[in-house]
Image (cartoon, rainbow, N blue to C red):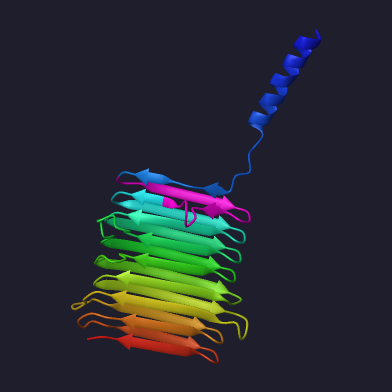
Amino acid sequence: MNKAFSLRSILFISMLLFLTPVQANDIYIQQSGNNLDLDITQDGNNNVAGTSSTGITLTGNSMTFNIDQIGGANVVSAVVKGVTYTGNIDLTGNSNDVALLCDSAGAGNCDTVSLSIDVTGSSADINVNIGEGADAESFTGTIDVTSAADETITLTANGKSAIADIDVSNSSGSAGNSATYTQTGDGDTNGHTLTHSHTGDAGLTVISQSGVYDNIINLTTSGDNAAINITQSD
């Protein structure tokens, strides 16, 4: 009887452990195939969707990748390899980190990319590289940041057309934001385009556009102690 009772108890406890929800906030994905539709939602602090050493790697054409993270100190690290990519990243909380590479020697060149990043919270580090060393051809992106301060945005696009619309607003004083945009590749006939708007004090903006003609920048700032550096090549 004691042995039977002990065995039943062990089985019962094992079933409880099996049925108890596991709080796992780390997601790592290695995927290959066309027409991917991937949606990720994480709610809580310290959510991780890939890291620099073990990231999310998506290989294929015509991919859609959406991620929502709610909470502080979240991480999104992804590598996209393909021709056509549509993505949306929404972050709510402080101290979030986004690192997105599109192509990374995948030979697809990320020819047509549409990307939206929305951040509400302070101290986000956003680093996006479209096409990398390849010619991305067409990039359409929006980055909207509403924060107290201390945002770092780095956008690099290698392609003929990069229609980027960036809107940064920080409500506090001297901490400010830092934004660096680099666009390479030859333009001409509705090529290079960039629109940047910053509201708040102490904003640092560095923009570099290269290529043959079609270099267009529309920059609006509101606040004290702004530092702006713009370089365009023929």
User: Where the C terminus falls, by quadrant?
Assistant: bottom left
Residue 43 on image: x %, y %: 60, 52
In the image, residue 85 sits, relative to residue 137, either above or below, namely above
The residue under the point 55% across, 87% down is 202
Residue 148 on image: x %, y %: 61, 76
Q: Nearer the viewer, residue 135 or 40?
A: 135
Residue 81 on image: x %, y %: 32, 54
Question: Does the magenta run of residues contain 181?
Answer: no
- Given the current orientation, which residue lies at the most extreme right position? 2
Q: Which residues are magenta?
A: 34-56
Residue 65 horizontal side relative to residue 146, left or right: left
User: Where the N terminus falls, by quadrant?
Assistant: top right
Residue 202 horizontal side relative to residue 163, left or right: right
Quarter of the image holding residue 151? bottom right
The residue under the point 38% across, 45% down is 31
The residue under the point 26% across, 72% down is 161
Residue 7 horizontal side relative to residue 150, left or right: right
